[in-house]
Image (spheres, rainbow, N blue to C red):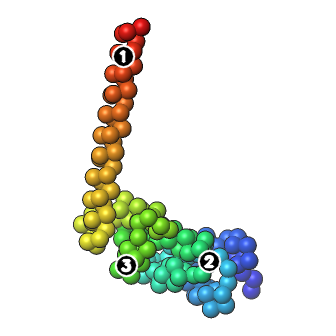
């Protein structure tokens, strides 16, 4: 039986739906494991894919680790929740690094009341920061418009 997945090039791995095949790929040290867990996140229940995402988050290749965090964000989008282990891994990585987009996905797609405490805090910080930034940008627009009106008036 030939596999429809090309582990050398990564072709077709986003369609993978067999956790056992990904486990076998981990065992043989295959390439593109981060890409494979994104595929699992699309096609498998969260409980099945979570341990494999966590394992991919510890891969030595930074690009594949990044894909593992993308898989966590994808799982949050599709399920509206993550496992406690995935929340812990995202928190350990922090908001400024490779996990930033995944954390933003969690804050966007997981209901606030379902978030762990650290994520509620991140949500609050992000909301206040975004509100202040919006006010700042609007005030800069108003001041710029007023300055332009004064200049036109003087001309």
Closer to the chain start, of discs 2 and 1, is: 2
Q: Which mark is residue 61?
A: 2
> Which residue is pictured at 39% across the width and 19% down the height?
148
* Left or right: 84 as drawn, with respect to 72: left
Q: Secondary structure at mark 3?
A: helix
- Which of 47 and 131 lies nearest the eye of the viewer? 131
**Is residue 4 in view from this perspective?**
no
Q: Secondary structure at mark 1?
A: helix
Instruction: Give the spatial CA distance, label 2 vs label 3.
Output: 21 Å
Label 2–label 1 contact, CB within 8 A: no
Q: Mark 1 sits on what residue?
A: 149
Q: Which mark is residue 88?
A: 3
Closer to the chain start, of discs 2 and 3, is: 2
Question: Is residue 91 shown above or below 142?
Answer: below
The crowd level at tag 1 (other Cα within 10 Å; few <14, some 14-19, many 20+) is few
* Left or right: 100 as drawn, with respect to 26: left
């Amino acid at each position: 039986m030939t596999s429809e997945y090309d582990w050398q090039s990564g072709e077709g791995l986003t369609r993978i739906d067999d956790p056992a095949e990904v486990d076998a790929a981990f065992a043989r040290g295959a390439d593109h494991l981060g890409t494979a867990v994104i595929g699992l996140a699309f096609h498998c229940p969260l409980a099945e894919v979570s341990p494999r995402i966590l394992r991919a988050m510890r891969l030595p290749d930074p690009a594949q680790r990044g894909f593992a965090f993308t898989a966590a964000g994808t799982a949050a989008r599709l399920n509206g929740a993550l496992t406690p282990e995935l929340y812990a891994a995202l928190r350990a990585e922090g908001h400024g690094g490779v996990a930033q987009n995944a954390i933003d996905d969690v804050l966007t797609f997981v209901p606030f009341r379902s978030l762990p405490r650290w994520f509620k805090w991140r949500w609050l910080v992000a909301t206040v920061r975004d509100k202040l930034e919006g006010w700042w940008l609007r005030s800069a627009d108003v001041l710029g418009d007023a300055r332009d009106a004064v200049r036109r008036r003087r001309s």
